[in-house]
Image (tube, rainbow, N blue to C red):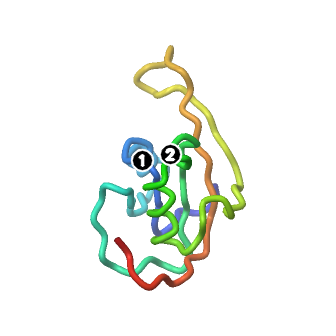
Amino acid sequence: MGAVPPLLLATHHMPGANLKHAWPEAPRVLTPVVPWSEPLPAEVLLVAQPADLRDPRVQRWVQARTGHAVTDIAWQGEVAAPPWYRSEAEPVVLKWARLTVHPVAAQP
């Protein structure tokens, strides 16, 4: 995924919290359950579970934060692995994309 992003947007708080520790210097993590009032940086890394992307609430959150509709995002990669604490479990699938943030009028 390249250099440490200044901000990681995650569609679910569990992968977001786990990914925060994927880099030596942890980025800030924003999820739908984390309140946020600061402007976003010009570029963010969005990480999403495919099932989350079908949820209209998540779709609205992504659009409000980034200015991108979920259906228009060009995903740059996908990874799958079982949770580290349950190696016998089904793999967790995560899609990711670096996005340029487009200004939005109001953020929920």
- Residue 105 picture quarter: bottom left
Q: Secondary structure at mark 1?
A: loop
Q: How many marks?
A: 2
Q: Which mark is residue 12?
A: 1
- Residue 32 picture quarter: bottom left
Q: Quadrant of the N terminus?
A: bottom right
Asked if residue 57 lies left or right of residue 49, the reply is left
Can you identify the residue that label 2 sits on?
52
In percent of the image, x 64 and y 39: which residue is there?
79
Which of discs 1 and 2 lies nearer the camera? The answer is: 2
Q: Secondary structure at mark 2?
A: helix
Q: Are marks 1 and 2 in contact (CB under 8 Å)?
A: yes
Q: Nearer the viewer, residue 37 or 107?
A: 107
Q: Position of residue 7 (x, y in %)?
A: 45, 66
Q: Nearer the viewer, residue 31 or 28?
A: 31
Q: Which mark is residue 46?
A: none
In percent of the image, x 49 and y 48: which residue is there?
55
Q: Residue furthest top?
A: 88
Mark 1–mark 2 distance (CA, rounded to whole Å): 7 Å
Residue 3, above or below 53: below
- Residue 25 picture quarter: bottom left
Q: Position of residue 10 (x, y in %)?
A: 46, 54
Q: Position of residue 2 (x, y in %)?
A: 64, 59
Residue type at mark 2 is Asp
10 Å crowding of disc 2: few (<14), some (14-19), many (20+): some
